Amino acid sequence: MYSDNNLIKPTSKDACQLLSHEEIARYSRQMILPELGKPGQILLANAHVLVIGCGSLGCPAALYLTAAGIGTIGLLDYGTVELSNLNREVLHTEHGVGASKVDTASSFLKTLNSHVNIVLHKITLNKETACDIIQNYDIILDCSNNAHTACIINNACVFSRKPFVSSHLQGFECHLRVYNSADGGPCYKCLNSTVDLDPVTGSMGALAGVMGCMQALEAIKLAAKIGSASSGLLFQGALAKFEKENLQERNKSCEVCGTDPVQLNKLIEEQICDIRTVHHTNGYKKGDEAAKVMPVKELSGNTGFHENYLICSTSNEVVSETASGNGSSSHKMELSSAEIARYSSQMNLPELGKTGQLLLSNACVLVVGCGGLGCPSSLYLAAAGVGTIGLLDYDEVEMSNLHRQVLHTEHGVGTAKVDSVTKFLKGLNSTLKIIPHKVVLDSRTALDVIKSYDIVLDCTDNVATRYLINDACVLSNKPLISGAALRWEGQITVYNYKDGPCYRCLFPKPPPPETVTNCSDGGVMGVVPGIIGCMQALETIKIITNIGSPLSSAMLLFNGLRGSFQKIKLRSKQPHCVVCGDNPTITKLIDYEQFCGAKAEDKEAGVSLLSRDQRLTVLEYKNMLASGSNHLLLDVRQPVELGICCLDNAVNIPYKEISRAYRIEQIKLALKERKTSQVICLCRRGNDSQLAAVALKKVLQDCVVKDIVGGLTQWARLVDNSMPIY
Ligand SMILES: Nc1ncnc2c1ncn2[C@@H]1O[C@H](COP(=O)(O)OP(=O)(O)OP(=O)(O)O)[C@@H](O)[C@H]1O
Ligand SMILES: [Zn+2]
């Protein structure tokens, strides 16, 4: 068996059925997704996932698996960190050069999530060690990016009946596949018999970021038993083209999975995977018929796009340091030998080369929002060597951020987001100028901040800020890379680039505030903004270096549940657009909160619809329960939320359904059964419960309808400390 002394075996963790209050607060944004819920989060906490290779794919995969709360994560790699890794292997640091990759990766992961059991395998995976290690895990991620290792993993996975998620990168092209899935999907060998592969010609970190995140997403779905796996995806990064790949079925005469286990074991013994007999394979060739372009369709009007926007807030510090975009005096003409060493693998891309690297070094990019999108996008910009990166966010880190905002740490809860991101980026690449702006971007500050940068990334979560950034970019003539993510879905597009449209060309009017859902209410699977943020970095790099075709006049829509992308054509630049059109009426920044009728933040604004006598405090309700007073308690939250916490006597009718006739009938029946005419509405924080009470008062005129101030959150604070706050 293995000889490596550093190998630590994963402990067999007992099935844990409980999540601590801290874990519920941490994962609340994903636990309120109906597809996951608390049962799904418990499945994740009990899952064992092995990440083979802690390089360009393994780093983002491990980062998002850790953030998501996978109980045990194995990191396997024999290598040590080199300077040339740091343009794409984003969990390592300059300080860690020379140290073991699994050590450098795990040291950050532990600060992100101390609940996760990280197991280190400092070994070379070979036919002797593979089965022994793999059998301790439920799901395997092949992040090795080489066919020989894929073959070894495949044999061991078929033998141990484990699914494995594999990704392969080659220049700007890559694919993702789930092999050996429980639903009868093919194994690696079924699909890859003799296909030859061009030699790998360099790689782009942000693209590996997208694929590593995709691998993490598939692993999360497998662990939580969500959706079906077993298909593939092809991605041409330079063109932002994705295509779903329908994998063949399992090949009954496959020399690996078509063989019975005893025979297979023998084959493994006989070194079926000896390197000399294995062709360098990935099953996917440039110009393959399968890699056709996805058709695009016209998007007319708003088509519910606004609904997908995340909606966040307020301090006004003065920006001290400035960037030096547009003709800065420190224009770089040459790269140092340390820079050449660091960026060599991406400079090897013919599309990039030294010219592209110099363009990156001289670029100034502003990332607005250091949350779910800002963390991955700024990470890959820094790895790639974007010379100046501005980081703007007014907010502080909260526990509920850590499932997706992967550059912050547990220790940093309560401290400025811009500070944790700055610290992380400097550790990865100290040669860059990183400028933190801990301010609210508003009409007074925006133009002044933006003018020093060449390109702006919108990584915010509220409509007012989106219009503000758009107008500021149009007025200062800067391209805008816009991302959004909610639930399992994400979107990315480029505005105001060359002759493309701006945000207002597509959405001249803001959506009604009540139609906009934020992450706190709608939920978000953490790795989805990870994928979109990496794509934002990739589009930014393409624009700086003039590579391929950026997503201007086009939008990429991502559906994480289906694991699919769709590219749609957008309306072109509008001559009548009020800001970028022929006769603009907006020539300076306006009051965007007024324009949108909503605050420039996503924090829940408390509603006040009921008078004091129509409401009960949690203590009053506690006394009411103690007195045995007859009433109907209506919990108006989504069913998935009741799985997180609830009061025993509650009847659940979601607020959005409260006015439906059959729901009213249900309520009337429940009142009759309880022989009462008192209805008490309850929700998470006391907002929806007021809305529900107002709606019910109209139809239940003979009843007394009240709600509980501050909802279950206040109940947990003042009455029952054993209840979690999410
Ligand atoms: N006008 C603005 N000025 C500065 N920062 C902003 C502005 N609007 C939004 N942001 C920042 O953009 C980031 C968006 O991050 P994200 O969408 O992940 O949500 P969040 O607010 O951190 O988390 P949650 O929605 O779960 O509470 C936030 O950190 C927020 O503070
Ligand atoms: Zn416009």
Image (cartoon, rainbow, N blue to C red):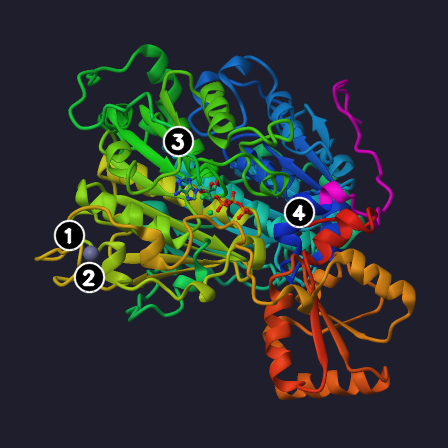
For marks 1 and 3, the one nearer the N-term is 3
What residue is rendered at 17% in x and 28% in y?
Answer: 326
Q: Where is residue 262 in the image (x, y as percent from the top left)?
A: 81, 49
* Mark carried by residue 391: 3
**Residue at mark 1:** 499
- Pick whichever, 188 or 219, lies toward us: 219
* Nearer to us in this view, 23 or 561: 23
Q: What element carries label 1?
A: loop
Q: Distance between the residues labelled 4 and 2?
A: 40 Å
In the image, what residue type sits under mark 4? Tyr
Q: Which mark is residue 27?
A: 4
Q: Residue 274 carries which label?
A: none
Against 636, residue 225 (above or below) is above
Where does the N terminus fall, quadrant-wise?
top right
Magenta segment boundaries in residue numbering? 1-23
- Name the residue rendered at 67%, 51% in the picture: 163
Instruction: State the SS at label 3.
Output: strand
Residue 636 located within the stretch drawn in magenta = no
Left or right of residue 629, residue 306 in this image: left
- Front residue of 26/717: it is 717
Q: Is residue 271 visible?
A: yes
Upstream in the sequence, badge 3 or badge 2? 3
Residue at label 2? 572
